[in-house]
Image (cartoon, rainbow, N blue to C red):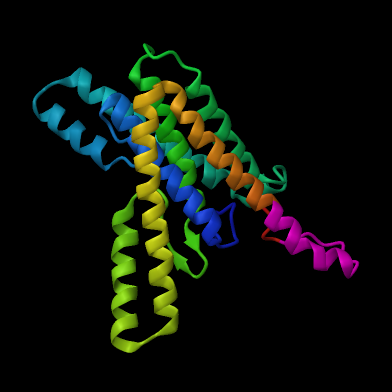
Amino acid sequence: MATIHRRPDTLAVGTLLATVGGYLDAYTFVRHRVFANLQSGNVLLFCVEATARHWHRAVLLLIPVAAFGVGVLLVEVLGLPRVLRLVRRPLRLVLTLQILLLAGIAAVPDDAPAQVTTVTVSFVAALQFSTFTSLRDAPYTTLAESGNLQKGIVAAHRWLSDREPAAARRAGQYALVIGAFVVGAVLGAVITRLVGAPAVGVASGLLAAVLALLIRQTRQLRRPDTAAGSASTPPTTP
């Protein structure tokens, strides 16, 4: 699988991204009564509407699914070797695109069609889901907590039964990510009810903080190489 992000995420980056995931889910649900992050709900609703022969509503549900697919494909294409030779900082490009798209949604009038928001958020979610997949030494997702909850419970069980220090650390990591998602969801619900469409600007700001953190981490990793007079660029540079 092609990748544009070869370095595992730190806890700071992972918790910020999980906060964004919870925030966007709450934002789209409060505004439009849909979950636009992942597409299980849309696929299910498509099947329900199709079996009831509500073809127009069924087709509308496929639009965010298609947007999610386009986002996944974009990350795959950016990770191809021949594309990486042309796009030097694909991770920064993807994060910047997410920031700008969410900032654009914040400027959309409240009476704009719901599809404008849900399709954009689905595309942004696909970029995040496909890019950020590893937290330190363990897989995770920042958009849905079922997998994180399962892995966290398994790690906690191994820690309690076998006293594995690594398992205790992984359980704590998953607990922090899940907690960050919950905090994001609470903030998303409250702020969206207060200010409406512009509330998504908070998620854009959080992603800007993630971008700043990644740039700072990259510079810190490159300092020893610079001091030693190395002219090579690390393959993990985002």
Foreground pick, 4 / 204: 204
Q: Is residue 29 above or below residue 83?
A: above
Determine if residue 36 is in view.
no
Foreground pick, 142 / 82: 142
* Stretch of the chain drawn in magenta: 216-234
Say left or right for 29 vs 5: left
Say which quarter of the image contains residue 42: top left
- Specify the principal SS of the magenta part: helix
Say which quarter of the image contains residue 172: bottom left
Say left or right for 151 vs 17: left
- At x 59%, y 50%, the residue is 79
Q: Is residue 139 magenta?
A: no
- Residue 17, given in percent of the width and then of the height, sits at 48, 48
Foreground pick, 149 / 232: 149
Q: Is residue 151 above or below residue 238?
A: below
- Residue 75, given in percent of the width and then of the height, sits at 53, 44
Most extreme residue toward the bottom is 162
Say left or right for 74 vs 66: right
- At x 62%, y 45%, the residue is 211
- At x 16%, y 34%, the residue is 47
Q: Is residue 104 above or below residue 34?
A: above
Determine if residue 157 is in view.
yes
- At x 64%, y 52%, the residue is 214
Q: Is residue 221 magenta?
A: yes
Most extreme residue toward the left is 52
